[in-house]
Amino acid sequence: MLEYVNRKDSDCYKWDSECAQGCLPLWIADMDFKAAKPIREAMQRRLDHGVFGYSIVPQANYDAVAHWFERRHGWKGINRDNLLYTTAVVPAISAIFAALEANMEAFRTHYGKTGISGSPLKILTFTPAYNAFFSSIENMGCELVPCPLVLVGNRFEINWSDLEAKAKEADVFLLCNPHNPTGRVWSRAELERIADIMRREHLFVLSDEIHCEFAFPGHAYTPFASIVINDTDFCVCTSASKAFNIAGLLCANIFVPNKELFAQINHALEVHEVNGLNPFGLVAQVAAYNESEAWLDELNEYVYGNFCYLRDFIQKELPQLRIHETEGTYLGWVDISALNMPAEQFCCDLAKNGHVLFNPSEMYGAEHYVRINLATSRDILVEALNRLKSYLNK
């Protein structure tokens, strides 16, 4: 059963950060719901053991991940030989970049991409993009190749001609499936077309699928691995953290079908010291995937209800704003361009004078949008939107 928790004064980044003081924080992407009972019980059993030393990854974790994705999403073939563990998806992405960069000249030579030899690893990704994509690309000494999504009606679409052109100058395509922050859930047809372009232009694909458990009615998450079952020039990052609200337990997975690259990424994880796991994260993941599906289904229904409330409220009460149809994740992406002010300025002023905290779109490489976290109680969402209305109607 889904249970809202007041996280104030619990050393919670979302609620207790300095910038969140006095605000209803609908910003950073974690949830205000207590973890599922099977997860809490599994952690209690581990706690009762009383010793919390270094842990190995038991076979139960590999089995839980493999069974979950095959049963719930039709993704077959995950096993101990192609699954790596690390602390979180962002460190996983950075380690993958490091492994690819260390071997990229051989990769470029193999595929005849000599025109960009000697340059930094070039990372192609859709924008707007999750802000950690930008920092990971920069921190690892790589070069961003942005491919802006285009708004068609009330939905963001891929600019296919731009994607094809930019794929010719890049090494890696960094996919977010489903997409943060726009909430697009890429269709099988779209993913197949992406795969065809990347295969033709010899790009390695790195797919971040941390939001995979959130797809609204009429939409379905398609694992990228199920599109490219005969390929090996890709890897997929997943984690139970986003779906089951256990991000602080630090446990994520990297699916790597290429044996040589598997060893290289494993080495990069060791070099960057992100291969040691929290024992509570391991037991929580098993309990999440093996025993907490009903809780997740209830969560999805509740979050979708929150999105519908947000959409209807904006359309009826705040016509100066525009809400795009979200297909998944628990994030609303709202157009504030009619207010004629930068999103950063708007968010700062709203926090100060309206006491609501959203994420401004500049951090995601876009202008005139705000990102709204819907993974909270309906009462909190209602109060936040009423505050927003009062602020805008001053």
Image (cartoon, helix red, strand yellow):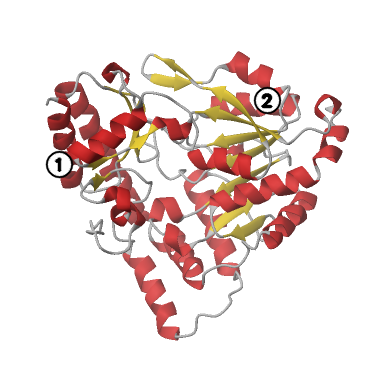
- The residues tagged by marks 1 and 2 sit, at their Cα atoms, a distance apart of 46 Å
Does dot 1 land on a helix, a strand or a loop?
Answer: helix
Q: Residue at x 35, y 69 (%)?
A: 40
The answer to whether residue 363 is above or below residue 268 is above
Does dot 2 land on a helix, a strand or a loop?
Answer: helix
Q: Quadrant of residue 122?
A: top right
Mark identifier at residue 196: 2
- Residue 249: x and y, percent? 46, 64
Q: Quadrant of residue 359?
A: top left
Q: Is residue 72 visible?
A: yes
Mark identifier at residue 86: none
**Residue named by callout 1:** 383
- Residue 78: x and y, percent? 63, 53
- Residue 214: x and y, percent? 40, 42
- The amino acid pointed to by label 1 is Glu
Earlier residue among tags 1 and 2: 2
Q: Residue at x 55, y 65 (%)?
A: 61
